[in-house]
Image (cartoon, helix red, strand yellow):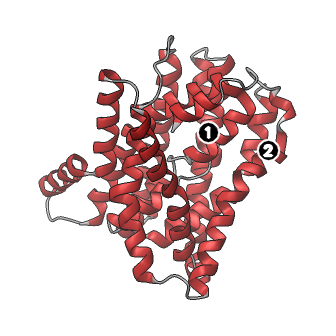
Amino acid sequence: MAGKMARECEDAPDILPFNRIGVPMVLNSLFPVFALIVMGMALKHWHLTSTDFLRTADRLVYFIFFPALLFWKIGGAPPSPTVNGLFYLGVVLAILCIYLGSLAYIRWRVPAFQAGTFSQNCYRINTYVGMAIVINALGGEGARSFGILVGFLIPMNNILAVATLTWFAERPTTTADRIRQASQAMISNPLILACLSGLIYSRTVGSFPTFVHNSLALMAGITLPMALLSVGGALNPTGMRENWKLSLVSTGFKLMALPLIGWMLLRWMGVGGLDLQIGMIYFALPVSPATYVLASQLKSDTKLTSATIAFSTALSVIPLAIVLTVFG
């Protein structure tokens, strides 16, 4: 996906003035995502979708469409002529800081059933919203850099999420059993396999034939709408009321702590220019709909992740508007 969108933006301006983008462009990117979540709620309320339909949709996204998107996005990403290692190191360290912080909070006051969901909600980002914002704000060069960053981070984020969800979901009797089950889940996880396959393909082949590219594009295009409709279908007033406190805590990790820690690390490492802009947009993005898919398939709390996606998507307007205005 990143490769295609980058190619489509070849004729775009190099970099648009950052402080001219502002809130309207952020709303243009966020509103469609939130609208699909609301549509999913409405369809379920009007009985146009059912629990069985949403469960089947989750399985299709998890096992077919989302892996296809990841393989397409990573496998078709163009190589970067120059890579700033300190930039990637800073982003990775920021995510690991938030991940460890989420684990510390879990030990304090998060039940096991919600632990894996809470943790992944603290650091996983909505790449679709991110790519739309980067293309509008930073043009083709920004889209290429953002796509490479996302492709680099997706395997790590999925490994952290799957390991944590598996560790807390099954509650085996011994630590050895937990490690064994978490390892088996990571080895067989379709999202991780898709990421690794994409990385191998990008290094050995590097581009898709047109008919393969078009087929994967059609499959990938189903992913986000179907995932967001499922998210909306799982939302209900009771779930929102029950989970609003924990949802706001994970949203605070994601939209406040991650941008702040990320900014300090990148500035400390001397990262600036386009890399700093890309990194700050990445840090300020809302929670990914993929968190719902993983929570559903790995038997964690889908109500919590649905509420967090809704809260973070609505509230992300604030940090994104600040980032787009300040880091010019």
Dot 1 and dot 2 residues touching (CB under 8 Å)? no
Any part of residue 153 in sight: no
- Side of 69 relative to 178 (left or right): right
Percent across and percent down for residue 283 are 60, 39
Mark 1: few, some, or many residues within 10 Å (few <14, many ≥20)?
many
Q: Which of 69 and 24 is in front in this view?
A: 69
Q: Mark 2 points at which residue?
A: 25
Measured as percent of width and height from the top left, residue 70 is found at: 41, 43
Q: Which residue is drawn at the image coordinates 36% and 69% (left, top)? A: 113
**Amino acid type, label 1:** Met
Left or right of residue 38, residue 293 in this image: left
240 relative to 104, above or below? below
Asked whether residue 82 is in view, the answer is yes
Residue at mark 1: 131
Q: Is mark 2 on a helix, strand or loop?
A: helix
Q: Nearer the viewer, residue 269 or 149?
A: 149
Question: Could you say whether the residue bearing mark 1 is in a helix, strand or loop?
Answer: helix
The amino acid on which the numbered mark 2 sits, given as a three-letter code, is Met
Relative vertical location of residue 211 with respect to residue 177 in this rendering, above or below: above
The structure residue drawn at horizontal position 46% and vertical position 55%, both measured from the top left corner, is 290
- Measure the C-alpha gap from mark 1 to mark 2: 12 Å
Furthest toward the right, the residue is 20
- Frontmost residue, 177 versus 53: 53
Where is residue 275 drawn, in percent x and y?
62, 21
